Image (cartoon, coloured by chain):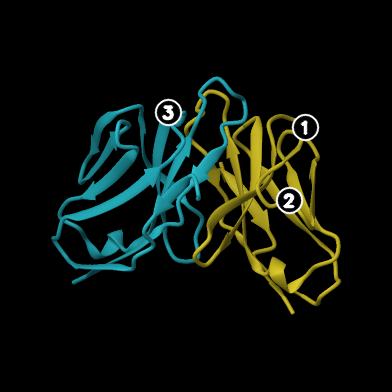
Chain colours: A yellow, B cyan
Amino acid sequence: NAGVTQTPKFQVLKTGQSMTLQCAQDMNHNSMYWYRQDPGMGLRLIYYSASEGTTDKGEVPNGYNVSRLNKREFSLRLESAAPSQTSVYFCASRSRLAEETQYFGPGTRLLVL
Amino acid sequence: QKEVEQDPGPLSVPEGAIVSLNCTYSNSAFQYFMWYRQYSRKGPELLMYTYSSGNKEDGRFTAQVDKSSKYISLFIRDSQPSDSATYLCAMSATRGSTLGRLYFGRGTQLTVWP
């Protein structure tokens, strides 16, 4: 039981390049989330998916797109990376039976030059 | 004004000290209150949660919620170097929603030195 997994762990991009961050959970959770964490800013919600087939914008969605591929997988795409998107990205999932608990992945460190 | 305010510290204490971490919030609809611990270069992990007002104890950790003051606290007794981490408070407004969106504080960086 791996919990929430994220790939890659670390990535360097040049401005304008695109990439997809992958997230998968094996806990049969309905809801999944993408956050970014920046120094002094805490965790900020980018997008979320309350259930398979639905996605909604969070606090800072500009410059990102998401896909809820199935119940297990939720990907985050940067179409044209910008230096302001340099951050640590965390994926999380939550069971409907445990609203107070979100389980986080290990994170992806992204550097945009 | 952010919905959840948390002093980022850093906080540095000697081993064995009692640590007090705090958050304030503005949204009176928050019902669930959580503390996450995040070690360096790791993802946040749930440490404790409480519902509405009151106290909850788990070993050396005690979480307190005062909804009348919109103030929550986490106390760590007999602190250990292994407690050195960033502590994030988080809150959720609704239990019935399928979303369960969490609102996070900025986190307080704690160092416990031997």
- Badge 2 and badge 3 in a common chain: no
Q: Position of residue B23 (x, y in %)?
A: 35, 48
Q: Which mark is residue A54?
A: 1
Who's the residue at 68% across and 31% down the image? A50
Give the distance between the C-alpha atoms of the residues marked 3 and 1, in whole angstroms. Answer: 25 Å
Residue for badge 2: A61
Residue for badge 3: B31
Instruction: Give the quarter of the image for residue B63.
Output: top left
Is B2 on the left or on the right of A64, as rendered?
A: left
Helix, strand or loop under label 3: loop
Are there few (<14), some (14-19), or many (20+) residues within 10 Å of tag 1? few
Q: Amino acid at mark 1?
A: Thr
Q: Which mark is residue B48?
A: none
Is A95 on the left or on the right of B39, as rendered?
A: right
Helix, strand or loop under label 1: loop
Q: How many marks?
A: 3
Q: Amino acid at mark 2?
A: Pro
